[in-house]
Image: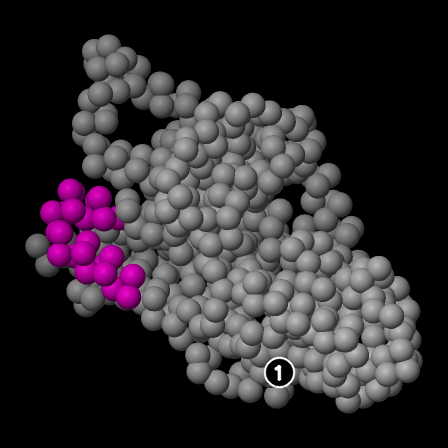
Amino acid sequence: MAFSKTTTDKKGLLKDHSSKVVFLIGAILGALTFIVIFGASMVSPSNTNWVFAYTSDATQHHLGWVFFRNTPWTFPIGLTKGLTCTGPVSCMYSDSIPLFGLIFKILSPFLPETFQFLGLWGMICFALNGGFGAALLYRIKPNIVFSSIGSLFYSAFPPSINRITHHNSLGAIWLFIIAMILCFDYKKKYKHKFTPMILWSVNCMLAVLIHSYFVPMVFMVMLGYVILVVFRDKNLKKAVAVFGTSVASTLLTLFIIGGFYGQGSYIDGGFGGYSSNLNTFFDSRGLSKFLRPLNSFDGQGEGFGYLGLGMIVCVIIAFIILLSILEKKEGSFIKAARGLIKKYKVEFWAITAVFMFSFCWAVSNRITLNGRVLLEIPLPRLIRGGLSIFRCSGRFIWVSGVIVMTSAMALVSKLPKKAAIVAVSMCFLIQGLDIRDWCRNLHKQYGNPPAYEYALKDEKWEELTEDTKEIIFLPMKDAYGLYMQMYFDFAQMAAKKNIGLSSFYLARMDLAACRDYAQEQYDQLKAGNGRSDVLYVFFDKEDAVEETDKTKVYEIDGYTVAKVK
């Protein structure tokens, strides 16, 4: 008996060691995948060329962090000053990845003036996507080779590749992969009974500190965990405790980084427009070498969920394997399917609930297939407003996509060991060939970006900003987001000279207050009562005021500005 116990312990230790090894292998493969696709130069902290050469959301995220870096420490600790006339805003609303934003703000005294962490963040995301993807597969099939090769599907997940260069924070699918791992470990006996609560709470806190859209994604997967714990483990108290502490830690983290600070609506409208098309798993949007793009609606790029041809082949193989398993069972095919579902009914409903929750939210109330609207479900104003907090609902398709990938590889793992490894290897080879041209273009674009030349290079700017405390953009436009380049050009100058901005391109801003403030300043300027400590920047040339002895209007570097003596 003693010998048996010792052997079991050794096997347990060996399995735990192997799990760590497979995570490390997956993480290394993920990091290498990032470098192969984007190039190593993107990771360099001093390389801001790609951030500014290709104006995108990444430019906003970087400049938001620069302002955050220059803001004195306060509480809440995530507040950024100088981005709007209404006062400080949380760095989470400039999508500056608060987790890294806070770390590098602490290290700021030791960092050079020119510094970016977005490339490093991208490589770490790919590494963690691969590492935790491998750990997830290892729980399904405890084989290091199979799990390591399969991890490449997580690190090279097409939606993550698509996001990491512009909306960088959204590359962290490892957050809900961790949640899936916790679901697999729902029966695990920890040394301390509070460990599951701590693990879920930390994951929720990380989601807040990376991007708010990951918060509902983690809670979606937690639904599956609750179902397993309540109906399979018969432990209602544990489920309630995990959910309760997760909600509390989420709200506390939001409070600490300033998520509830200031004015402005959390509701931005547009729910249903930024959704997923029913064809999303098969629509490469022109990024596949072999599959033609399918029709979709404007805004549904947010719901990009292409699995890749290799994974589509893997799903087909998995379906054949499932049919083969059912065929071998006694009785009719339908009876065999019912028997399998009955045996694993709790697990089946847990997976189905998470998949359907994420899939339906991604598709939204406006159900589309290719270029047709199949059904539009009217929603009460209150519900529609609440859902608009996460109006880009199409992003939730990533949870469904990862469930499909994981389920497909789980079924492929039922093949004999060598056959399973060959099958998953062949599928990833097809995947690589499918997205090869897309990845080559990305490598060419980001591996050696063009040298960025700052737009505001006229010497006159030094004179105009000498005693300037604020840059006011006039008059405020409803479609101010169309003027991103203008905002970014002046934000760079403002950050260097410690000048505040009247408005900026943010996820959450009190637009009405900014508009009223700009209109008030505009009226005063036109009436001859402008401020000498302000640089007035006009969205369009025709908006400029008439020049007077007191107010001088300039055309510099393609922009129209005014300065009061």
Q: Is residue 245 covered in magenta? A: yes
Q: Residue at x 73, y 39 (%)?
A: 437
In terms of depth relative to the viewer, which is nearer, 437 or 479? 479
Vertical arrangement, residue 46 with respect to residue 160, above or below: below
| Quarter of the image with the C terminus in it | bottom right
In terms of depth relative to the viewer, which is nearer, 122 or 188? 122
Q: How is the image coloured?
A: one colour
Q: Residue at x 42, y 69 (%)?
A: 260
**Could you tell me residue 94's position as x and y percent?**
57, 66
| Residue range (magenta) | 225-248
Q: Which residue is farthest top?
A: 332
How busy is the neighbourhood of tag 1: few (under 14 within 10 Å), some, or many (20 plus)?
some
Q: Is residue 338 left or right of residue 554?
A: left
**Could you tell me residue 37's position as x and y percent?**
68, 50
| Quarter of the image with the N terminus in it | bottom left
- Tally the numbered discs: 1
In terms of depth relative to the viewer, which is nearer, 266 or 274? 266
Q: Which residue is farthest left?
A: 1
For residue 18, what is the image quadrant?
Answer: bottom left
**Could you tell me residue 250's position as x and y percent?**
35, 64
Residue bearing the label numbered 1: 70
Q: Give the main secondary structure of the magenta stretch.
A: helix
Q: Is residue 175 covered in magenta? A: no
Amino acid found under the numbered disc labelled 1: Asn
Q: Residue at x 44, y 79 (%)?
A: 76
Vertical arrangement, residue 483 with respect to residue 221, above or below: below
In terms of depth relative to the viewer, which is nearer, 499 or 171? 499
Vertical arrangement, residue 413 with respect to residue 232, above or below: above
Q: Residue at x 36, y 18 (%)?
A: 323
